[in-house]
Image: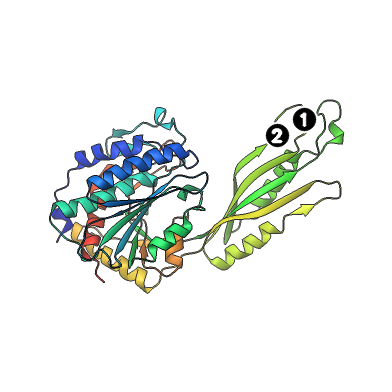
Amino acid sequence: MNPADLPLDLDALLAGLRPWIECESPTFDVAAVNRMMDFAASELVAAGAIVTRFPGPPGLGDCLRGDFPHPRRAEPGILMMSHLDTVHPVGTLKTLPFRRDGWRCYGPGILDMKGGAYAGLQAIIALAKAGIETPLPVSVLFTSDEEIGSPGTRDLIMEQARRHRFILVPEPGRPGNGVVTGRYAIARFNLLAEGRPSHAGSQLKNGRSAISMMAQQLLAIEAMTDDDCTFSVGVIQGGQWVNCVPTTCRAEALSMAKRQADLDRGVERMLALGVQNTDGTRFSVTRGVTRPVWEPDAATLELFGLAREVAADLGWSLEHGSAGGGSDANFTGAAGLPSLDGLGLLGAGYHTLEEHIEVGSLLQRTRLMAGLLARLTA
């Protein structure tokens, strides 16, 4: 089967993608994420899948698994794994509406990664409509907290992944029309500065500002960045009244490295920043979610080789490589499960108000995933 022969219509695909994008689903808005899961569940049922819903951990949305009909349904097969949470708050559609502008299409979460999740489902649907039975059974997993490192769903992800032979992840494709066969190691940290309160007008010198303490530490943290390990601070919250010397200030930091050993050293440096001062103030660092480094093994490279054959049939040369930025393939790949990431759409600007896909990649990547599903065997 040549995936180029599948009867796919670009305008119809774009029309079907629109409601996925217009159902906004930021990670921390449980009701919004669950509305997205409700919609995705209806799409799965319409596609013929049996849907299992997993209640979300406290403060997080639910997850879905869709199992498609297959004579070998009980055997290990292919898991297509996507997240449906985004970084864009509800209301972003007002400034970043779903719209097509030539060969770009914009919208919150369209690239990271609702477009890829949608394309993966359309690949399964296209094969079924063409009467093509995949050699292995196919399931999809939609999760709710990848944008914060998957703290609540990691166990579910690994439990589901270990039931399958192959893991396909339609996160955004690599620039240059490639896929991802490895990812850097990532660690998150929670920072807390604890000062001493006083009235900022009449007794300023009696206080110790937690915000000032945090600001000094943030500069020191980001200055630790080198070629082997990066450090950045992306969240900060402190103070409540401008006329009070702030007692607490919280922040979140991120460290990333190509090699696990470099990240481990970075973690040690971060944890060593904690200090208890003689005046009663203190600065503490606690380790948050960590994604292990994923380096491609023979099984992953064999999986890529098959994808490259499919791409050749579609008329282009598929490249691969490791990528910064985490995905749930960090977990499955590092565990030795054959995983192929970056199968999703091409574009730019994700996590910004310029997030868009290259329209042509919706057809191209749907065909790529369909061809891969049709060729993977035990």
Neighbour class for label 2 at 10 Å: few (<14), some, many (≥20)? Answer: some
Counting the numbered discs, the total is 2
Do we see residue 267 in this rendering? yes
Report which quarter residue 46 is drawn in. top left
Amino acid type, callout 1: Cys
Residue 201, percent across and down?
82, 25
Query: Which residue bears the numbered disc 2?
Result: 239
Query: Which residue bears the numbered disc 1?
Result: 244
Residue 164, percent across and down?
34, 66
Whether the residues at callouts 2 and 1 have beta carbons within 8 Å, the answer is yes
Residue 228, percent across and down?
57, 62
Residue 51, percent across and down?
31, 51
Do we see residue 356 in this rendering? no
Q: Nearer the viewer, residue 130 or 92?
A: 130
Which residue occupies 20% across, 38% down? Answer: 11
Distance in Å between CA atoms under marks 2 and 1: 8 Å
Q: Is residue 305 left or right of residue 251?
A: left
